[in-house]
């Protein structure tokens, strides 16, 4: 049977708070909890058959139940998940800092990383808005030029039709003019 041999181990296994009022359990402590033999929580009355000093529980021993062991293991799993979450957050802050090209010579505070990221996003949004305004302006200009080009094509087409009609009229008069010129004694 496992017996804690110091007051520190007793605090470690009992889940007692350390000086900062936080529970202190390690994986080794939880593994050792499984080795403890459950004992009755109540001490036998003096004078009874079970009151001999050899059978009385040691003052530093503690009763361990499967529920307390389950709670201790669950707490360790929770602590591991929280530690992994913190590591992921810190890794993502480092990635964000490198993406923003922040100096890594000194430890960059998370507040600085977030402030720089917000400023960068605002700058990018204003640039995006400026590009959108320029795009809208260019679209209007393209539509205006397209309408003007269409009007020019229509005018050119009308002029070409008028010239073709005029040319056809001249060509149709040529035989009559040629006949008149041959009969005309101007020479």
Image (spheres, grey):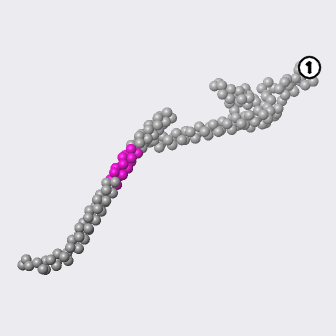
Outermost residue, right side: 49
Q: Let me know if residue 108 appears in the view.
A: no
Query: To which residue does mark 1 refer?
Result: 47
Would you say the magenta stretch is mainly helix, strand or loop? helix
Q: What is the quadrant of residue 90 in the picture?
A: top right
| Residue 12 higher or lower than 132, as above or below | above
As rendered, which of 41 and 174 lies closer to the eye?
174
Who's the residue at 47% across and 38% down the image?
A: 117
Outermost residue, top side: 46
As rendered, which of 22 and 54 lies closer to the eye?
22
Residue 135 counted in the magenta span: yes
Residue 105 appears left or right of 92: left
Q: Let me know if residue 47 appears in the view.
A: yes
The C terminus lies in which quarter of the figure?
bottom left
- Label 1: how many Cα within 10 Å (few below 14, some 14–19, many 20+): few
| Residue 164 higher or lower than 133, as above or below | below
Residue 169 appears left or right of 94: left
Outermost residue, bottom side: 182
Residue 2 appears left or right of 132: right
Q: How many numbered badges does the structure rendering display?
A: 1
Residue 100 counted in the magenta span: no
As rendered, which of 97 and 133 lies closer to the eye?
133
The N terminus lies in which quarter of the figure?
top right
Who's the residue at 74% across and 29% down the image?
A: 14
Residue 130 in picture, x, y percent from top left = 39, 43
Who's the residue at 17% across and 75% down the image?
A: 177
Who's the residue at 82% across and 32% down the image?
A: 38
Magenta residue span:
132-146
Residue 101 in picture, x, y percent from top left = 44, 42
């Amino acid at each position: 049977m496992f017996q804690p041999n110091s007051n520190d181990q007793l605090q470690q296994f009992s889940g007692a708070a350390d000086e900062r009022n936080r529970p202190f359990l390690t994986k080794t402590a939880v593994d050792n909890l499984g080795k403890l033999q459950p004992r009755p929580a109540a001490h036998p009355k003096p004078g009874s058959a079970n009151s001999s000093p050899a059978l009385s529980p040691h003052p530093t021993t503690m009763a361990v139940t499967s529920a307390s062991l389950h709670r201790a293991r669950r707490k360790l799993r929770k602590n591991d998940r929280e530690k992994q979450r913190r590591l992921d957050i810190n890794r993502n802050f480092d990635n964000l800092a490198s993406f923003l090209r922040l100096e890594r010579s000194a430890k960059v505070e998370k507040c600085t990383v977030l402030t720089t990221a917000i400023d960068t996003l605002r700058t990018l949004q204003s640039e995006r808005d400026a590009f959108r305004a320029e795009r809208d302006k260019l679209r209007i200009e393209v539509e205006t030029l397209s309408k003007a080009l269409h009007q020019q094509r229509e005018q050119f087409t009308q002029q070409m039709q008028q010239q073709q009609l005029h040319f056809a009229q001249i060509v149709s008069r040529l035989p009559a003019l040629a006949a008149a010129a041959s009969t005309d004694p101007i020479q």
